[in-house]
Image (cartoon, rainbow, N blue to C red):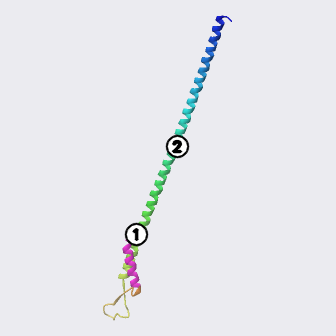
Amino acid sequence: MSSREMEQLELKQKRAEIQLKRLEVRKERLNMEKLKKEQEKEDLEMIEKRADIQAKVMENDRHRMMMDRMEFRDEQELQRSAQSSVFTLLIALTCTTVDEERTILGSEPFQTPILVGKNRDTALAKLMEQIAYL
């Protein structure tokens, strides 16, 4: 082989090596891009998971607020019921009726309470219980 052929052969080998290196660099670049895309995908998945968690936290807060509102309404209803009970008991304790057996014709009517004896004591106890609740 002549020196010129040798040079051409070496030149071809160097070109082949350069081409091989370029292919290796291109392959490495593609691998880097692939890794970068995978990382971006993982980042997006993490963002989605955080958004889901945040949505669930907000949903839990909303449920908690609804429960608090319902408890408040129930408490108000119990207080209204207790107040109504107090007023009913007060009316029952203060109302009187005309005692026909003790009233004399043409005179001032004799009044007797509607609740007497144990019934009156029970009503008073219930009244005190309801007042203590309020």
Q: Secondary structure at mark 1?
A: helix
- Which residue is at 38% across, 78% downward? 127
Q: Which residue is mark 2?
A: 48
The quadrant the N terminus occupies is: top right
Q: Residue at the right extreme?
A: 1
Residue 94: x and y in percent read 35, 82
Viewer-side label of 2, 1: 2
Neighbours of disc 1 within 10 Å: few (<14), some (14-19), many (20+) = some
CA gap between label 2 and label 1 equals 46 Å
Label 2 amino acid?
Glu
The answer to whether 27 is drawn above or below residue 12 in the figure is below
Percent position (x, y) of residue 26?
Answer: 58, 24
Dot 1 corresponds to which residue? 79
Q: Quadrant of the C terminus?
A: bottom left
**24 displayed left or right of 110:** right
Front-most of 81 and 46?
A: 46
- Which residue is at a point 63% across and 11% down the rendered structure image? 10
Task: Report which quarter residue 114 is drawn in.
Answer: bottom left
Q: Residues within 10 Å of mark 2 (few under 14, many from 20)?
A: few
- The percent position of residue 87, horizontal first and vertical second, equals 37, 76
Prevailing secondary structure of the magenta residues = helix
Q: Which region of the structure is painted magenta?
A: 119-134
Q: Which tag, 2 or 1, sits closer to the chain's start?
A: 2
Which amino acid type is shown beneath numbered disc 1? Gln
- Residue 122 colored magenta? yes
Comparing 84 with 52, the one in front is 52
